[in-house]
Structure formats: structure tokens, C-alpha cells
Image: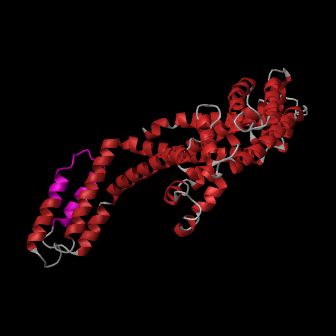
Amino acid sequence: MPIADLDNDASDTVIGLLETTESVLAELQDAAEQYESITTQISDTGHDAVVETADAYRRATGLLDRYIDSATGTGDFQAYVEFQDKFLSCVEELPDELPARGAFETAADRLDSRRLSKSDFASAREDLAPAKRYIEQLESYNQTVEAVKTARRNVTLHRRKLTDAIDAHDEALSFADVNLDAPVEQLLDPIETYNDRLHSEFDEFITTESTATVIDFLEYADSFSLVPFQSPPPDLRRFARESPDSDEPIPTLLKFASYSGSKLDHYATDPALLQTTVAVHQTFLERLDAEPLMIERPPPTAGTLRQFTGEAISILGRFASEKTIARLRALRDQSYDDSYAQLRTALRAQIELSADERERLQTGTMADERDALVTARTRLTEALTQTQSQVE
């Protein structure tokens, strides 16, 4: 679907992607046409013949550059003899059917003189001009090959962006039949209530219970794979088991760890162990929160939620109130209701789709955008297929 056929409500992002599609396709088409043009020119002569003529031109002009000072005028006679021998041999060895062979012979005749001047060298270079175009053809060929490679790379990169956009549209279009006005608060309110209570009670647990109790809790939680608390470091576990200072709450120990050695002596039973353990793991202790036990919004699928709550309830029993645990059980029970999946999908749509996306979804614009993106990607794929032989 062309850009012009899209609804005026199409997103700027999609329009930009389609405009860039035209740009990278034009770049590739231009590079491909230049490639075809130069390969046709070379084919008319024959690739091997063009390469051989270009090599001969390089050898001949290389000799002119090398000997222009030493073999001219009344300079080095030995250099003059050496130059003439090399140049004439270079020309004599050329195949009779070599393109522009006459140019080499003309230059050789000009340089077959008892004395050479710099103007003779300049004229000989002009004589070789008909052979120079074969080097230019090879240079043009190499440039067009690189241009095609660059254009193909740009097309490939842009095609990936189109694929990402198509995937995003597919995900949004999966909500096409969802009732966006569904009463998602029936699912959202219990989740928020549970999370709020959990957050408050876990903070109280972390800040008031002994460090040993918290570390013991984390070790216990370690055995539950669906509740991903970070495992406490081994030296912190040893500290919790062996140090009398671990009877203090975490905030107190963190405050102690900031004290100087002499001040800490008045507060800690084993100051050295506290400093080398608590201070080292300050970041770990400060970042402890209830996140692994919280229910995300939107919540997981019904089956996943049931598995999660089975483990979470066991862990909550170590610190949470019965009311909080009851809230989680109620969420688990709600997952058995037929409305759970519908409410969850509606909540996903409300969270994941912007107001603009919801409007484009309901008006059909998003489906049209997807069709246009798929058409654009197909054109890019076809262009890449058509130009594959130009870079092999």
C-alpha cells in the first residue's frame, strides 16, 4: 500500500519508515543501474582484456614516472638505456589484440630517440591516454560494487526496522477484539492493595528484624525459583551465623559500618568483621525490597499466577500478616474465574497501548499501516534478491 493511500491518521513513525523505504530503494536502484552500465562497457571489450590493458598502462606510466629525471637531457646515459630497454620490452610483450595497443606503440616510437626530454615523456603520456580509460573503467566498476554493497546494507538495516514495526503492529492488533472499556479495576484494585500492603510489611521486616533473621529469610527464599530474591553472599551468611553483631537490624549495621575504627569499637563486638563484611555488601543490603513478591501489572497468565502464589505464600509466611497473605490467595482464586483472562488482556491493552494507538486500532488505521509496512518490506526483499549477483 503506497503512502498516499494511508489514512491521514497514520502515525508519523510509519510514514517516516515508508518514506525511508523509497529513499533506500532509490539509492539501491541508482547504484544497480550504474553497475549494469559499467559492466556492459567492460563486457563489450572483455573483462580480461580490460584488466590486461589497465595493467600495461600502469607499468608504462610507472616507467615514465620513475625515469623522467634520470633518463632525460644529458643526464645518466645508463638510466636512459635502461629506460628505453624496459619501455620497449613492455610494449613488445603486449598481445597483438590488446585494446589500445596502438597507443603503446605510438608512445614507444616517440621514445625511441637518441635523446629524450621531459616534454617527450609528457607527450608519451598523452599518447597512452586511450589506454587510461580502461583503468577508469575498472575504478568505476570497483566504486559501483562498493556503492551497491553500501546500498544493500542500508536496505537490509531498514528492512529490520520494518520488521520490528510490523511485529509491534501485530502485537497491537492482537488487541483488536478486546473490550477496551472492560472493568479492569476488578483486577487492578486487588493487585494494588496486595502490593501496597506487601511493600509496607516487607520494609518493616527489613528495618526492624535482626540482620541474621533477614539473611535466614533470604536463604529460605533461595529454594523458590519463581520468587527471584538475590541470594546472600557467602561471607554475609557466615557473618549472620557467627557474629553477635548480626542481632542488630540492617539499618543499624549499615550506620555502624560508616563509623571510624575507634568509634566502632564502642558499638560492635567484632568491629573488623563488621567492616569487612557489612561495608563490602552495603549495596546488596540497601537494595533489598519486596519486588520479587509483588504482582506486576498486567499480572501473569492464570497458570503462571497460580504457580507463583504457591511459592510466594510459603515465603510470605516468614514475615507478612494474614491479611496480606489472604489478599494473595484471593488473587489466586480470581485466576480461576473465566473473566480473569479477559480482564488481564484488557488491562494489557490499556497499559501497553497509547491513546493514539487505541484510536488507530479502533478506526482500522493500524491494520492499514501494517499492510503498507509489509508491502514495503516485500519490495526491499525483492530488491535485495535482484541485486545479489552484483556483489558476489
| Above or below: residue 19 compared with residue 75 | above
Which one is nearer the viewer's eye here, 176 or 185?
185
- What secondary structure do most residues of the magenta stretch adopt? helix
Q: Which residues are magenta?
A: 87-112
Q: Where residue 135 sits in the image (x, y, percent)?
A: 35, 54
Q: Is residue 101 found inside the magenta-colored segment of the image?
A: yes
Which residue is depicted at the point 28% across and 70% down? 122
Question: In the rendered view, does 126 fall on the left or right side of 36?
Answer: left
Q: Position of residue 356 (x, y in %)?
A: 84, 44
- Residue 82 appearing in the image: yes
Is 274 left or right of 200, judged from the image as shown? left
- Residue 98 or residue 365, whichever sits in front: 365
Residue in the foreground of this view, choosing between 292 and 245: 245
Report which quarter residue 91 is drawn in: bottom left
Q: Residue at x 58, y 55 (%)?
A: 282
Which x, y percent locates residue 392? 42, 38
**x and y, in percent, of residue 354 in the image:** 81, 43
Residue 304 in the figure: left or right of residue 38: right
- Residue 373 at least partly seen: no
Q: Which of these two is toward me, 172 or 125?
A: 172
Q: Residue at x 49, y 47 (%)?
A: 235
Compared with 210, 331 (above or below) is: above
The structure residue drawn at horizontal position 73% and vertical position 44%, both measured from the top left corner, is 202
Q: Quadrant of the N terminus?
A: top right
For this view, does 198 lie left or right of residue 217?
right
* Magenta run includes residue 197: no
